[in-house]
Image: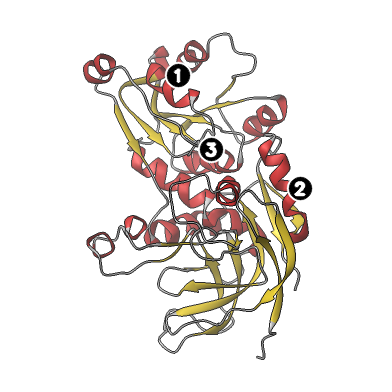
Amino acid sequence: MSLPEKQWAQVVEKKGGPPVYKEIPVPKPAADEILVKIRYTGVCHTDLHAMNGDWPLPLKMPLVGGHEGAGIVVAKGDLVKEFEIGDQAGIKWINGTDLSCEFCQQAEEPLCPNAQLSGYTVDGTFQQYAIGKAAIASKIPEGVALDAVAPILCAGLTVYKGLKESGARPGQTVAIVGAGGGLGSLAQQYAKAMGLRVVAIDGGDEKKAMCDSLGAEAYIDFFTSKDVVADVKAATPEGLGAHAVLLLAVSEKPFQQATEYVRSRGTIVAIGLPQGAFLKASVFNTVVRMINIKGSYVGTRQDAVEAIDFFARGLIKAPYKIAPLKDLPKIFEMMQQGKIAGRYVLDVPQ
């Protein structure tokens, strides 16, 4: 098929934004890349961090953000064997790696020191046509809805990986901080599908309604709770605390609080990335209660296969709202104000 020379995209022209909706050239895939005609793309809090240049990473500028892009392969390089024209494909946060370093050879490609990051170090999916390394891009099974699967490519994959890293076993309790957000709504479903019990922690009635609908056994509202730690413990078996804590928050305080309500020998998994935040914990408490504190980044290629499979089998239903690509600046404003429950997915013009 013939491809256009120009396309519509949301372009951040300077650090801090806002994104500008404008026409830019359609990229051409290298020998090991695919070109995906993006149909839908999720909006992640990371995209806001990228626009603002919040993290100590090289930031491409001008930048097309986005890293939850689902669409159709319309062109590919000569070396690509993994995809055929017409296949459904997803472009994720990890856009490409060197595939030759120690981490890549041990199937830990997100830790590759030479990883390319969609919507941060290379252009992402807030455009009609996006590039991805074929070896890293995800295959999306035929028949899977592209709008609904888009949030799985980052939010779903990230929380699924975090739950695996927590080591929590079926029947145990996981406390999810930020449970009513885009990642949290998916984390609750993956936890439930994995046989875990959920204590949801977030703020506000809208998020409570969402968490209740997703089957959380308890909802702790940090806006109204007089003692979050005591309330979380009270919601767990025997009041001993959660076996695992997933920290999806975008502020620092919850990261300091988690050691107080995690169960002895429990695991705290830091996933959210508040700007300039630090993890602090009592050494005595951490040692004598044998608490495990760890970070979890995005998943590997195999984690992505598994996360998408959970979705394809109907075990995960990502709560999302659809908006046109041109509305991205409005969505960023709502995100900054903490007014988004669930996820926004952008409908990319065809």
- Above or below — where is 22 with respect to 267? below
- Mark pair 2, 1: CA separation: 39 Å
Residue at (31, 17) in percent of width and height: 282
Measuring from the top left, give residue 5's x and y in whole percent.
68, 84
- Mark pair 2, 3: CA separation: 27 Å
Q: Is mark 3 on a helix, strand or loop?
A: helix
Measuring from the top left, give residue 255's x and y in whole percent.
44, 27
Give the number of the mark in front: 2 or 1.
Answer: 2
- Mark 3, residue position: 188
Residue at (40, 31) in percent of width and height: 171
- Mark 2, residue position: 330
Q: Earlier in the sequence, mark 2 or mark 3?
A: 3
- Quick one: label 1, few (<14), some, or many (20+) residues within 10 Å? many
- As rendered, which of 34 and 205 lies closer to the eye? 34
Q: What element carries label 1?
A: loop
- Mark 1, residue position: 236
- Name the image colouring: secondary structure
Q: What element carries label 2?
A: helix
Q: Amino acid type of disc 1?
A: Thr
Q: Amino acid type of disc 2?
A: Lys
- As rendered, which of 106 and 194 lies closer to the eye? 106
Q: Which of marks 2 and 1 is nearer the N terminus?
A: 1
Is 240 positioned to the left or the right of 55 in the image?
left
Is 153 positioned to the left or the right of 322 in the image?
left
Measuring from the top left, give residue 91's x and y in whole percent.
53, 65
- Mark pair 1, 3: CA separation: 16 Å
**Based on the displayed image, in which of its 4 quarters is residue 189 positioned?**
top right
**Based on the displayed image, in which of its 4 quarters is residue 112 positioned?**
bottom left
Tally of numbered discs: 3
Measuring from the top left, give residue 233's x and y in whole percent.
45, 15
